Amino acid sequence: MGKILSLLLLFLLIGCGTSPQEKVSEILQSRGATNLTQDYKKITQYLYTYKEKLDIRNPKAFNKASQPYIFHEIKYAQNGIRMHYNGNLLKTYDDYLRIAFDKNPNIPERNDFLILGLHKLLWESYKIGEGHQITTLSYKEEEFKKLYYYLEVIRWKVKTAKDTNGNFLFITWQNNWQVELHQKLLKGEMLSWEMIQNLPSLRTKRESILDASNFNFEVILTQIIDQVKNSAKQIGKEPVDIGIDAMISLVLFL
């Protein structure tokens, strides 16, 4: 029975003027487009969690009134929120990311600029506004390579970028005692064991100097990057890992 069905399928393909190889290719392309949709859904879940954690760790860097609307945008794959900065309406994800990583220490709502920049970058790359894509041919391989490099640079910048006062733009991997130590050193206090012991988080024993750094944020961004890499494989070739300087040269917001 199975052989008969296989023969009927083969005759149907030939009768339609499409070779078996071409039909298989179309099926794989269609399946790949579906996989990209699934990748995007997983990414939005990671981004939602990232926003939650980022706001907890940086409670003065987001707008509480806007928070539920941003969560709604991410969860339901919408792209309606537009922010202003210095009286100017921000239009592209580059606009948002430039402000998120601006060295000005007085950037308001820095978390929101970062998250919306990431959301808009992913939303455009996956063509969410154009509806479900029938095949992977609708996507451009180079755009996903660029997306991959954007995310790698963002992961690096979130971890390392500082403002003009020497403070980290985002508190992610640092323990509280590390932040307290950094602030004291910026004020010119001399490093000593006594000074470290008297840091509020260590003195009250809320933390220990032996506590591991917080890698939750880096792990979430890595999960997003892995999903993008998986999408790139569906479209063409896996992005090649290159040095951070080379990646920076390929993105615009720095």
Image (cartoon, grey):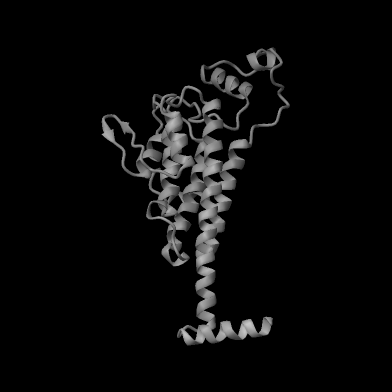
Tally the marks: 0
Residue 24 at what x, y percent from top left? 54, 76
Which quarter shows the C terminus? top left
Height in image: 236 above or below 190?
A: below
Residue 30 at what x, y percent from top left? 50, 66
Height in image: 56 above or below 238?
A: above
Residue 31 at what x, y percent from top left? 54, 65
Spot the residue most to the left. Answer: 87
Residue 246 seen anywhere in this rendered image of the structure: no
Q: Residue at x 55, y 49 (%)?
A: 225
Q: Residue at x 39, y 24 (%)?
A: 106
Which quarter shows the N terminus? bottom right
Residue 170 at what x, y percent from top left? 51, 30
Q: Nearer the viewer, residue 132 or 2?
A: 2
Q: Quadrant of residue 193?
A: top right
Q: Residue at x 47, y 83 (%)?
A: 18
Q: Nearer the viewer, residue 193 or 32?
A: 32
Spot the residue most to the front. Answer: 1
Relative side of 82 to 42, left or right: left
Q: Nearer the viewer, residue 15 or 32?
A: 15
Residue 144 seen anywhere in this rendered image of the structure: yes
Q: Residue at x 55, y 59 (%)?
A: 35
Relative side of 79 to 234, left or right: left
